[in-house]
Amino acid sequence: MYSRVLRNLLTVSRKYSGTKINNQFKTKFYSRGKNNFIRSCYSSAAAANSQNVDTPTKPKQPDRTCIDEELLEEEGDSWSLKNKHEKAKDRLEKMLQEPEMLRLYKVLQIEVEVMRQSGDDVPENLKDRDWVELLLMNSQAKRKRYLNFLFCIEKKEENKRNKRLAKSKEVEELRQAGLLRPNDIPLWMQYTLGGNSLFMRIRDSSMNTTSNWWLHRASMFGPKVVLDCGFEDKMTRQEIRNCAKQLMFAFAANREYTEPFDLHFCNLNRSSYLFEELYSFIPTMLEPEFPINLHENSYLDLYPRDKLVYLTPDCKQMMSDYDTDAVYIVGAIVDKVSGNPVTLAKAKKEGIRMAKLPIDKYLNFGGGSNKSLTINQVIGILCDYYNTGDWYHAFRFVPRRKLTESREVQLKKKLSYYLENNKDFKSGKDFAIESRNKFRR
């Protein structure tokens, strides 16, 4: 869904038109006027960065807490310019300096080789970051599952390469046999892009410029939404990686709307593993022109307490309409095991108002379905309702597999399968009441 948007988002060293969201940006907007300012944002980089500013700009506020270009100038932040593999290599070398870790590393090398010779699913090559993950795992079962996961990824990539080679070989054989004839139709007669077509190609750079302009405008006039990144101590490393990926998808989904939110990532420690993973997904987020707001401090230091509303699925207060004066907070947490109401506890501890999405009012969840949604799904629901005012349309982001209708279809398929393949069961006791006692222990 966001493939083309993410391709623009993850392009390194891409220059974004428009100026920074600061006092100079606002001065240009109000001095030139709306129409002239929009033209300057869509002009070339040289025209956008020209020094012909009508009014002088105010100096930058010294108490700004946003993580911006100052991070790139600090001496201790040189690691942010490295890619993920180089950082993993440095971390592995640092870990192996300890004698205990070095001994464990040699033991794990022998363990992986024994598993490979035994016929287990083990990848052929392990990267430095894979060894770091294996060293941090405290059980053999976890390491075995992780190696199996890496093996599946390796085989998928291998199958893709084989398919591409087979396709290119097939095309080459057809070309040598003379079965591939050149197109005799002139280009001006072909209904294709660049030929006989009324439509022009919208380039990725144009889409990127427009999306970033919407975000710049939202930072001045749009509603504020906070993503609370202060739950890293309650997540495993795999959950942190999933959380960073969901944050990236949430940012990409938000910038697709003509009226997006002004997203603020609060409680984001730049020395944390979550920041490292988020930087690997969005390598341009530290550029000064990139329209993103990263804060190390809390949202309580940025907004009044009476305007904050924490969205948590565990509270009783249901959200009926979108309050444009409020600042909604979405907890950036992925909890696949415990399911503890950590967002509810944090909102009560800080004395913040709470609300939950009216999912039960508009949707019927099937039995045993989990009502928790991912971060990007929550942001998509809020963006849809803010732009359309229709909850039914906004809840299209809820997975259909969790609803009653979908679960009924799944149960019917399972029942028909069991009835058609009843010979596979050894005894009728599989469906008897006595067989259910094992689930009551």
Image: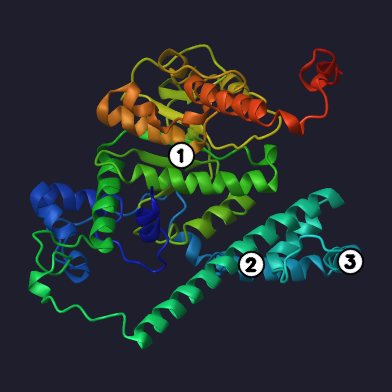
Looking at numbered disc 3 in the image, what kind of residue is underneath it? Answer: Val
In this rendering, the answer to whether 391 lies above or below 142 is above
- Identified by mark 2, the residue type is Lys
Q: Secondary structure at mark 2?
A: helix
The residue lying furthest to the bottom in this view is 176
Residue located beneath label 1 in the image: 376
Quadrant for residue 9, please give it.
bottom left
- Nearer-N-terminus badge (2/3): 2
First-in-chain label (1 vs 2):
2
Label 3 vs label 1: CA separation? 41 Å
Residue located 18% across and 53% down the image? 28
Provide the residue designation for mark 2. Answer: 87
Q: Looking at the image, which residue is at 22% across and 66% down?
A: 49
Please say if the residues under marks 2 and 3 sit with CB atoms less than 8 Å apart: no
**Where residue 114 is drawn, which disc sits there?**
3
Of 120 and 285, the residue lying toward us: 120
Residue at image x 17%, y 59%? 42
* Horizontal side of residue 407 vs 38, given as left or right: right
Q: Amino acid at mark 1?
A: Asn
